[in-house]
Image (cartoon, rainbow, N blue to C red):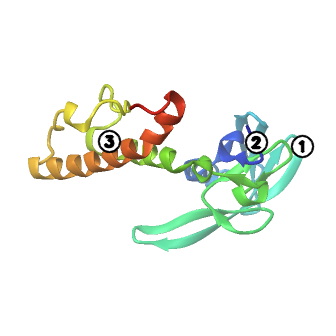
Amino acid sequence: MRDKTRRYTTELPCIGLTFLGNMRRRLADAPDGSAIHAATDSGTLWIARKAGAYKATINGHSLTLSLTTTLAGYGVRYWYLCPHCYQQCAKLYIGSKGIACRKCWGLHYASQSEDMLARMRRLIRAKRVAIWAHDTAGIMNLAKTPFQFDKPKGMRWETFERKRSQLFRLEEKYWKAFIPVVERLTGKYR
């Protein structure tokens, strides 16, 4: 087996747009020097308001946390500016000595390392959740066919039948692609 060469986004804690909204709301009318904090695996992150900007401190390392905006159909959307490359981003990842975007940390999404079968499994599960929701028992079990689940309440029969048949065709492709894997593990059946 190959050594792991990539680092993934799940390895570092992050602050996203929800955190940004809460930070802006809590520090909006606060006087300069007011701070909020968040405990992370990398240490405690302190964010203070200073002269209309934000100062982030983690494990004694400080940097300026800048924001930018873009126009959206519903008004204005706020973004972080990475303190290192100044690219706008929705998430900043927190290390023990600083905060940066995914690219500056050299992080990858786990889906970037998936093979064809893993991508198909993820797509199938996403389509199942779109039809039946997460709380449906057995929904993630690919051994169960889409015909074993009832129509969700409130969905039209025509829509349900169309989505279920699309899902069934996708699952059929998945199982055909999975046959060689099973044959490699068990030997070819004659």
Q: Is residue 76 visible?
A: yes
Residue 98: x %, y % from top left:
82, 50
Q: How much space separates mark 2 and mark 3, taking CA atoms?
A: 31 Å
Q: Which mark is residue 4?
A: 2
Q: Is residue 24 left or right of residue 1?
A: left
Quadrant of the drawing holding the N terminus: top right
- Seen in the picture, residue 148 relative to 164 is either above or below; the reply is above
Name which of mark 2 and mark 3 comes first in the sequence. 2
Closer-to-camera residue (148/56): 148
CA gap, disc 2 and disc 1: 31 Å
Helix, strand, or loop for circle 2? loop
Q: x and y percent of residue 146 in the render?
A: 25, 38
Is residue 29 visible to us here?
Answer: no
Q: Which residue is mark 1?
A: 60
Q: Are marks 3 and 1 in contact (CB under 8 Å)?
A: no
Nearer to me, 11 or 48: 11
Q: Which quadrant, please, contains the C terminus?
A: top left
In the structure shown, which secondary structural element does the residue marked by tag 3 occupy? Answer: helix
- As drawn, the label of residue 68 is none
Tell me what residue is drawn at x 80 percent, y 59 percent. Answer: 64
